[in-house]
Image (cartoon, grey):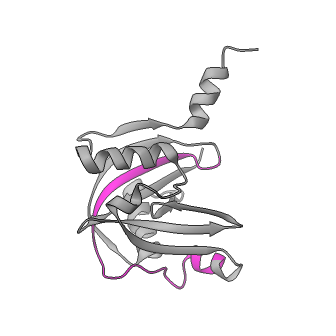
Amino acid sequence: MRQAVRAIIIRDGHILVMRRNKFGDKYYTLPGGGIDVGETAEEALKRELLEETGFTVTDSKLVFVEAASPQYGTQHIFLCQAEGDEPHIAADAEEAKDSLAGNVYVPMWVTTHDFRGLQFRSGVLHEALVHAQTRGFPQTPVELLNNYDKLHAGMAGKG
């Protein structure tokens, strides 16, 4: 199953998100992407964040693991400290190439207040992030079960 990483970066009351319009599907998510073969989650986190935002990870801590749908696989979500000014997509990143095909990828800061109203790709991750911003992030990684898994778990005994 696919493995991926996501970065939570919060600065001065703002959280860094990626606004996407992928083949007409409009949503927000955290910066990040797939873990390549032979790459650790931490290495993928550094590579993906640099590609999608131009930021360099200086510290990270795994706070959530989301068992997403088969299409998205397992998401390893890290709370990060990162260096960088204005977020931007690297010219050689996959997202920059996809943008030439009409897709849109925009890394951007949103206030933590405005974050609550975003149409986020993963509702369970969005809910966990809203909760963590008011109550604090977990000290040990928390497994998030999304609606896809809840639905299929509930259907397991039926038939």
Q: Where does the C terminus fall, quadrant-wise?
A: top right
Q: Taking 16 as reference, is 67 left or right? A: right
Residue 84 occupies which quadrant of the picture?
Answer: bottom left
Residue 13 occupies which quadrant of the picture?
Answer: bottom left
Determine the residue positioned at 33% across, 60% down. 112
| 38 over 144 or under it: above or below | below
Q: Taking 82 as reference, is 76 left or right? A: right
Q: Position of residue 96 (x, y in %)?
A: 58, 80
Determine the residue positioned at 35% across, 54% down. 78
Q: Residue furthest right?
A: 159
Q: Where does the N terminus fall, quadrant-wise?
A: top right
Q: Position of residue 123 (x, y in %)?
A: 51, 46
Q: Taking 132 as reference, is 116 left or right? A: right
In the image, 60 versus 103, the foreground residue is 103
In the image, 129 versus 115, the foreground residue is 115
| 154 over 18 or under it: above or below | above
Does residue 3 show up magenta in the picture? no
| 54 over 36 or under it: above or below | below
Q: Residue furthest bottom?
A: 91
Q: Which residues are magenta?
A: 71-98
Determine the residue positioned at 45% across, 64% down. 31
In the image, 85 versus 50, the foreground residue is 85
Count numbered badges in the picture.
0
Determine the residue positioned at 36% across, 82% down. 86
Q: Position of residue 152 (x, y in %)?
A: 64, 28
Q: Position of residue 95 (x, y in %)?
A: 58, 74
